[in-house]
């Protein structure tokens, strides 16, 4: 008798569980068919369950939208205007350009594959080579007379015959754009090895000219900036590169005192370029290569940097408002 009673109780429990499961499924279906909204509007239900569940869904929708990012078709008028202002200035002044947002890989480019004399931009690739290949930076290079070159602020304190560490040479090369230090580093690495390394990163143009500097493209400079950004944290000596790039020596990307870029510039006669990384809340690369003179070039780069920064901020404000409207605007229900 007792055994039968126990079986009966188990059967009742199974029925109760089934009823509960069906009730949950029914409520879920009601919501997704819009009946919850109808009942709430009609005042038939006044409980907080609808609000709580609805907000969870909206928050999830918002986060997905933010994760997906936006494209030009989602731009509001302010973002469109700021992008047009930037591209108009680039076109008017025949500037080679590459903007790359790191969060969403959104790019703006202009003649990014056109090759022009890069001057000291090549020094960024030599620093990358040393760090990426885990070269012992305590090794030294002997300062020979054949390396001595004008515009060598760091090497001024050294004499012919001195042994200078690669770490010092890299610092001079990046921070002061020291030409003597560049020749010494390039001699240590070898042109063929540097070309091979650059090619492995995806760069197409390097040291193809008549000297130790050669041509560059905005596209290749963006590749180097991407690798530099990765090396800041991937390699122990990456922090040195970050430190050396954080300088104000001919830094034309710093268009005001409140915005700071890690950078490397190149300048020679009718060419002035500056490329760098903005490490704000939403980091980005910008490469600006011009056929402007050494004296006039910085003002053009500053203007491009400011217009880029304005677009960048508009893009993220646009993203925020767009996703908020998609997720929370009742008219989108």
Image (cartoon, helix red, strand yellow):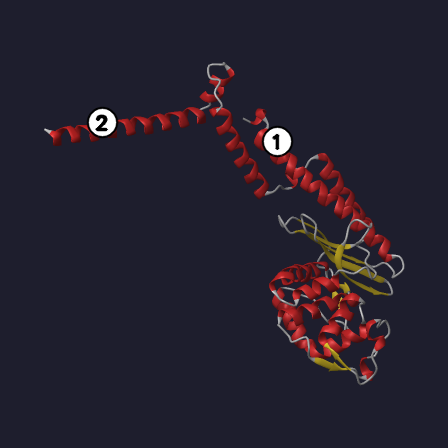
Q: Label 2, label 1: how many angstroms apart (C-alpha)?
A: 49 Å
Please tell me the numbered disc located at residue 63: none
The residue closer to the viewer here, 132 or 293, is 132
Point out the residue furthest to the left here.
Answer: 1
Point out the residue furthest to the right here.
Answer: 295
The residue closer to the viewer here, 179 or 237, is 237
Q: Which residue is mark 2?
A: 12
The kind of secondary structure element at disc 1 is helix
Rendering coords of residue 76 (x, y %): 69, 35
- Corner quadrant of residue 289: bottom right
In the displayed structure, 204 sits above or below 51; it is: below
The residue closer to the viewer here, 10 or 325, is 10
Instruction: Tell me the residue at 57%/43% (across/down).
Output: 67
Rendering coords of residue 225 (x, y %): 68, 60
Residue 15 shows up from this direction: yes
The residue closer to the viewer here, 224 or 42, is 42
Instruction: Tell me the residue at 57%/32% (across/down).
Output: 327
């Amino acid at each position: 008798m007792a055994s039968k009673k126990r079986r009966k109780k188990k059967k009742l429990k199974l029925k109760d569980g089934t009823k509960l499961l069906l009730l949950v499924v029914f409520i879920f279906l009601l919501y997704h068919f819009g009946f919850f909204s109808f009942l709430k509007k009609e005042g038939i239900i006044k409980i907080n369950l609808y609000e709580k569940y609805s907000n969870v869904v909206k928050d999830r929708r918002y986060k997905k939208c933010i994760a997906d990012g936006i494209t030009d078709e989602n731009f509001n008028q302010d973002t469109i205007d700021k992008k047009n202002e930037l591209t108009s200035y680039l076109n008017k002044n025949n500037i080679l350009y590459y903007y790359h947002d790191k969060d969403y890989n959104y790019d703006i480019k202009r003649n990014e594959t056109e090759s022009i004399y890069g001057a000291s931009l090549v020094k960024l690739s030599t620093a990358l080579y040393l760090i990426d290949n885990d070269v012992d930076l305590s090794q030294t290079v002997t300062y020979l007379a054949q390396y001595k070159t004008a515009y060598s602020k760091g090497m001024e304190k050294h004499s012919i015959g001195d042994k200078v560490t690669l770490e010092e040479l890299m610092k001079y090369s990046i921070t002061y754009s020291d030409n003597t230090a560049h020749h010494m580093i390039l001699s240590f690495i070898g042109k063929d090895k540097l070309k091979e390394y650059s090619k492995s990163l995806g760069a197409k143009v390097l040291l193809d000219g008549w000297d130790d500097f050669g041509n560059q493209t905005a596209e290749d400079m963006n590749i180097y900036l991407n690798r530099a950004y990765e090396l800041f944290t991937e390699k122990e000596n990456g922090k040195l590169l970050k430190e050396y790039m954080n300088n104000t020596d001919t830094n034309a990307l710093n268009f005001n005192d409140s915005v700071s870029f890690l950078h490397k510039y190149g300048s020679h006669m009718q060419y002035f370029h500056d490329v760098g990384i903005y490490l704000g809340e939403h980091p980005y690369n910008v490469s600006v290569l011009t056929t402007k003179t050494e004296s006039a070039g910085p003002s053009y780069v500053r203007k491009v940097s400011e217009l880029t920064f304005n677009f960048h901020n508009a893009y993220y404000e646009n993203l925020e408002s767009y996703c908020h409207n998609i997720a929370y605007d009742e008219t989108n229900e």
